[in-house]
Image (cartoon, rainbow, N blue to C red):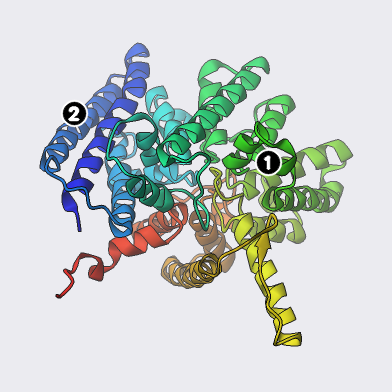
């Protein structure tokens, strides 16, 4: 284990996090929020000191960097980044419990949007900005950002291992020959779409502060609202803007790059076509199902498309209490929680590409049963999919089911209903935010015990990092020296 290089890059990441805390501190200072400003600046000081110490400890790092180091660095970085990023809430006293602070910040960085706050609007503006900003930072990944903007370790292996560990999806491909350049392109697309989203929100009369925070939640598909009613108090135009941009940020960013080079191939991408097919068909079914409650075709379509886009992209914004919808619509939303968005997007969930490949693999297996001597190949966009990718998906789904069951058992110690606990686990594990019943869109997670909040926080990290980096970090054998 190359601990020195892990230390060096972890130090760089903490210094970067300190820099990102400057805008929230400036907002608090300009508005006279002294307690919040002091809490943020104290955290900045801690981050700078720890960052410099870790960088110094890693000055003599070697060049050897394998997949194991990549997984450990990414998982450790997300845990440390979330814990230290929670300190402004704790130092300011706006969230008195350290466990609650950690839960809220993990929820932010993992773009989950689950909250323990009972009155969001009572929080200072500086900390509200930081809370929403964590969505945007976690959406594409802090280490991917570090790779994109900072000079660092040379070598494709290093960059590939980090992007493979932090980027969502069964595999990571290059847009251009160099992975570092790929990271830059992804972040340029991310920044560009975010700016466009802000402009559309401003055009609808939303204040600048609200526009930035809402765009951060939309771009990162996180869903932290700065109002107690989430998005319900805004106009239908602003809700419509979020509906469209939530769906856009749930698309694989590689497809946007492909649009500029070969738009026909981009439009034929099988994952994107299935993603929009599921979103539109579920929206239509829900719109028909909730029509008797809405009493209007227009409002039925508006509510259905907004919440379908919100849940499938794992954003978690809400404009009404969908927990009161008919049972069919509620079940469909639970299914969408699992399905999730596209690989290579800021969305969570299992990912559409995994569902597509599972279906194709099942189809190939069925044909193999009927014709034992045939050679069956699973293809995606006309190209064969390697057996290692399919085996990785099977391993992922096995781990996914086991972790979800184990989490449900632990969370059930709080003695809430099955609907509450199951939706809470699925919501956190798939990085969505609101669930059903006690954790529905008009409620929060404050009623859960500290143990359950820690378990759900781990679920958020496991879901955002696609399970394996966190499991490798927690695996004792990772740190044992191999015997000669």
Mark 2 = which residue?
A: 45
Q: Is residue 116 visible?
A: no
Mark 1 = which residue?
A: 320
Residue 215 as seen in the image, left or right of residue 109: right
Q: Residue at x 51, y 55 (%)?
A: 171
Q: Position of residue 247 (x, y in %)?
A: 66, 40
Q: Residue furthest top?
A: 30
How far, Cα to Cα, is label 2 from label 1? 41 Å
Q: Position of residue 332 (x, y in %)?
A: 71, 58
Quadrant of residue 367 in the image?
Answer: bottom right
Q: Residue at x 60, y 38 (%)?
A: 249
Q: Position of residue 233 (x, y in %)?
A: 65, 28
* Quarter of the figure with the N terminus: bottom left
Q: Is residue 479 visible?
A: yes
Quadrant of residue 390 in the image?
Answer: bottom right
Q: Residue at x 47, y 38 (%)?
A: 182
* Quarter of the figure with the C terminus: bottom left
Q: Residue at x 50, y 32 (%)?
A: 185
Residue 282 as seen in the image, left or right of residue 119: right
Q: Residues within 10 Å of mark 2 (few under 14, many from 20)?
A: few
26 in relation to 279, above or below? above
Mark 2 or 1: in front is 2
Q: Nearer the viewer, residue 181 or 91?
A: 181
Q: Position of residue 126 (x, y in %)?
A: 38, 24
Mark identifier at residue 443: none
For the image, the number of numbered tags is 2
Q: Nearer the viewer, residue 85 or 358?
A: 358
Mark with earlier residue (2, 1): 2
| SS label for mark 1 | loop
| SS label for mark 2 | helix
């Amino acid at each position: 284990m190359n601990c020195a290089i892990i230390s060096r890059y972890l130090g760089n990441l903490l210094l970067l996090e300190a820099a990102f805390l400057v805008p929230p501190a400036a907002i608090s200072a300009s508005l006279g929020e002294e307690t919040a400003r002091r809490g943020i600046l104290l955290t900045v000081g801690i981050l700078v000191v720890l960052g410099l110490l870790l960088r110094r400890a890693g000055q003599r790092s070697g060049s050897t960097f394998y997949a194991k180091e990549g997984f450990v660095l990414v998982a450790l970085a997300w845990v440390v980044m979330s814990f230290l990023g929670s300190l402004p809430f704790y130092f300011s006293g706006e969230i008195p419990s350290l466990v609650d602070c950690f839960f809220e910040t993990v929820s932010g960085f993992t773009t989950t949007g689950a909250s323990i706050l009972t009155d969001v609007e009572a929080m200072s503006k500086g900390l509200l900005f930081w809370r929403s900003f964590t969505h945007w930072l976690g959406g594409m990944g802090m280490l991917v950002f570090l790779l994109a903007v900072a000079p660092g370790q040379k070598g494709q292996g290093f960059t590939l291992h980090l992007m493979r560990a932090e980027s969502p999806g069964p595999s990571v491909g290059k847009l251009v020959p160099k992975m570092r350049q790929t990271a830059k392109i992804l972040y340029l697309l991310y920044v560009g779409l975010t700016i466009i989203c802000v402009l559309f929100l401003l055009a609808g009369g939303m204040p600048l502060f609200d526009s930035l925070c809402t765009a951060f939640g939309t771009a990162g598909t996180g869903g932290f609202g700065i109002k107690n009613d989430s998005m319900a108090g805004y106009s239908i135009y602003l809700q419509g803007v979020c509906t469209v941009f939530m769906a856009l940020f749930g698309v694989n960013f590689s497809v946007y790059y492909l649009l500029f080079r070969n738009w026909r191939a981009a439009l034929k991408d099988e994952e994107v076509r299935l993603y929009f097919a599921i979103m539109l068909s579920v929206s239509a079914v829900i719109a028909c199902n909730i029509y008797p409650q809405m009493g209007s075709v227009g409002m039925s379509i508006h509510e259905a498309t907004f919440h379908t886009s919100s849940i499938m992209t794992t954003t978690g914004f809400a404009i009404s209490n969908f927990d009161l919808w008919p049972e069919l619509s509620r079940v469909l939303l639970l299914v969408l929680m699992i399905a999730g968005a596209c690989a290579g997007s800021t969305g969570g969930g299992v990912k559409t590409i995994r569902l597509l490949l599972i279906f194709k693999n099942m189809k190939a297996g069925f044909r193999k049963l009927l014709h034992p001597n045939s050679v069956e190949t699973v293809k995606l966009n006309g190209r064969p999919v390697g057996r290692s990718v399919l085996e990785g998906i099977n391993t992922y789904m096995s781990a996914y089911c086991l972790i979800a069951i184990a989490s449900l058992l632990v969370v059930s110690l709080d003695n809430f209903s099955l609907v509450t606990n199951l939706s809470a686990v699925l919501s956190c594990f798939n990085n969505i935010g609101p669930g059903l019943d006690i954790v529905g869109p008009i409620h929060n997670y404050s009623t859960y015990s500290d143990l359950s909040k820690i378990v759900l926080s781990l679920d958020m990290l496991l879901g955002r990092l696609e399970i394996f980096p966190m499991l490798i970090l927690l695996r004792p054998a990772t740190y044992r020296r191999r015997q000669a």
